[in-house]
């Protein structure tokens, strides 16, 4: 991070790192993939309970409590397994 980065940008970067760490620790709950957080996504088990996508909360709300609450409603899956779940 650069010294010129705004407080908002630093917070967003820190929260994105936090979410990515959780993704890698959990890995895909269907196939076990856990190499790159960019290939892992949050799947809302009960779509009606969705407040926002986790990435939206990171970018817009920047609130770790809201992030954790939303992650609790989700399972972590790789892009391939997420595609199969959405079919």
Image (spheres, helix red, strand yellow):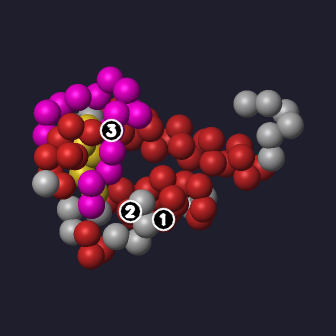
> Any magenta on residue 43?
yes
x 24%, y 43%: residue = 77
Considering every residue shown, the one lying at the far bottom of the view is: 48
> Is 39 placed left or right of 47 in the picture?
right
x 44%, y 56%: residue = 54
Secondary structure beneath dot 1 equals helix
Q: Mark 1 to mark 2: distance in Å?
A: 6 Å
> Is 29 placed left or right of 55 in the picture?
left
Front residue of this view, candidates 23 and 78: 78
Figure quadrant of residue 44: bottom left
Residue that mark 1 sits on? 66
Estimate the x, y position of residue 42 in percent, counting from the top left: 32, 51
> Any magenta on residue 34?
yes
Front residue of this view, candidates 77 and 26: 77
Considering every residue shown, the one lying at the far top of the view is: 35
Please tell me which of labels 1 and 3 falls first in the chain: 3
- In the image, which is nearer the foreground, mark 2 or mark 3? 3
Figure quadrant of residue 5: top right
- Relative vertical location of residue 73 with respect to residue 87 in this rendering, above or below: below
Residue 10: in sight, yes or no? yes
Q: Which span of residues is magenta-colored? A: 29-44
Secondary structure beneath dot 3 equals strand
> Is 76 placed left or right of 62 in the picture?
left
- Relative vertical location of residue 39 with respect to residue 47 in this rendering, above or below: above
Q: Residues within 10 Å of mark 3 (few under 14, many from 20)?
A: many
Residue that mark 3 sits on? 40
Please tell me which of labels 2 and 3 falls first in the chain: 3
Query: Which mark is drawn over residue 70?
Result: 2
In which quadrant is the N terminus drawn? top right
Q: Mark 2 to mark 3: distance in Å?
A: 16 Å
Q: Residues at badges 1 and 2 in contact (C-beta under 8 Å)?
A: yes
């Amino acid at each position: 991070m650069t010294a010129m980065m705004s407080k908002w940008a630093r917070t967003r970067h820190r929260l994105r790192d936090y979410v990515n760490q959780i993704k890698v620790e959990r890995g895909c709950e269907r196939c076990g993939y856990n190499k790159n957080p960019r290939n892992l996504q949050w799947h809302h088990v009960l779509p009606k309970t969705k407040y926002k996508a986790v990435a939206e909360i990171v970018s817009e709300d920047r609130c770790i409590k809201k992030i954790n609450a939303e992650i609790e409603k989700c399972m972590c899956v790789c892009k391939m397994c997420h595609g199969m779940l959405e079919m």
